[in-house]
Image (cartoon, helix red, strand yellow):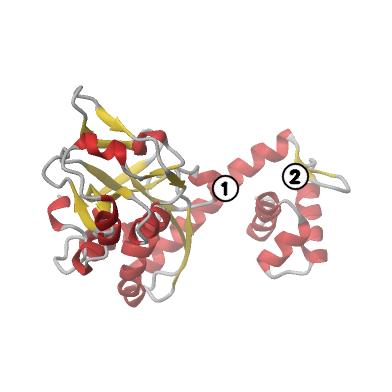
Amino acid sequence: MKATLEEITVYLAVVDTGSFTAAADHLGLPVSTTSRLLARLEEKLETTLLRRTTRRLDLTEEGARFARDARNIMDAVQLAEDGLMERKGRLSGLLRIDAATPFVLHVLAPLLPGFHALYPEVKLAITSNEGFIDLLERRVDMAIRIGELEDSTLHSRFLGRTNIRLLASPEYLKRAGMPKEAKDLLHHKLLGFLQPESLNVWPARLPDGKLLRIEPTMTAASGETLRQLAINGLGIACLSTFMTSKDVEAGRLVEVLATEIEPTSRPVHAVFYQQSAFSAKISSMVRYLVEALREPEEKWDRAALS
């Protein structure tokens, strides 16, 4: 093999960051070293991988193809290293996880100390995106997704189910009154999602038999923001139990139309790309979450998990 792993690592860092300076900072190398290693790689391969201008770097056709193949090489090397370290009981390296903010705050963060105790040499990088992301594009190893899965290119592991319910603060209900049936919601301040629109269809049937599609008084991109708005008395929200059970227990939120709405739950999955096998770090995290979320002391709504 003409190219070295060091040269490939530098090349992929330049591709991912979009500049020699950013790649050098990411790798902890001088810019001159980064530039020299990339030039040496192009010389060995006898091709131009990147077109350099004063403003940007663009991949050539050969460069794009090489980047794709190089990632497979680096993933295979990482997989081999992970397997060896796991067999030695010393799993290490970076694991990048993405999940919606409420799941990170209310489920993942409280569980991570236990994972860190088991695998102290694994470095975790946690990002929060409220919508579904492209794992490859964002360079994420694993994501937690709430709702039905549609991407057939992803492999998944079922973690459980979470119920959704209508909630409001005692202060709001004292001021606006407690709804007695679904149609009463039409006269209340309703808190909804900016997107997707499907989250603004609530499990409450109107007299015509249709589910209520709300016209929100106030919208937000994150369920965590809606939770805070509801706690602060700004209206009624439709939220998952995993992020609101403690609020109900503490009296910060009160369930609305508990016996009137249709029982509704959403699946929760860990998703990842998988070739012949998947990273030992991913498998260890998935295995840990599956076991941890089965424990009765975890504050999910236990009736919502299966």
Residue 199, quarter of the rendered image? top left
Q: Is residue 48 left or right of residue 75?
A: right
Camera-near label (2 vs 1) is 1
Amino acid type, callout 1:
Arg
Residue 302, quarter of the rendered image? bottom left
Local SS, label 1: helix
For this rendering, which residue is in front, 61 or 251?
251
Q: Is residue 113 above or below residue 242?
A: below
**Residue name at image x 16 percent, y 42 percent:** 180
Amino acid type, callout 2:
Leu
Question: Can see residue 280?
Answer: no
Local SS, label 2: helix
Instruction: Give the x, y percent position of residue 295.
Output: 16, 65
Residue annotated with mark 1? 71
Q: Which dot marks residue 45?
A: 2
**Residue name at image x 40 percent, y 55 percent:** 279
**Residue name at image x 41 percent, y 34 percent:** 197
Circle 2 Cα neighbour tier, 10 Å, few/some/many (<14 / 14–19 / ≥20): few
Residue 296, quarter of the rendered image? bottom left
For this rendering, which residue is in front, 67 or 149?
149
**Residue name at image x 20 percent, y 22 percent:** 208
Instruction: Give the x, y percent position of residue 83.
Output: 39, 61
Q: Is residue 219 above or below residue 127?
A: above
Circle 2/circle 1 CB separation < 8 Å: no
Mark closest to the chain's N terminus, 2 or 1: 2
Circle 1 Cα neighbour tier, 10 Å, few/some/many (<14 / 14–19 / ≥20): some
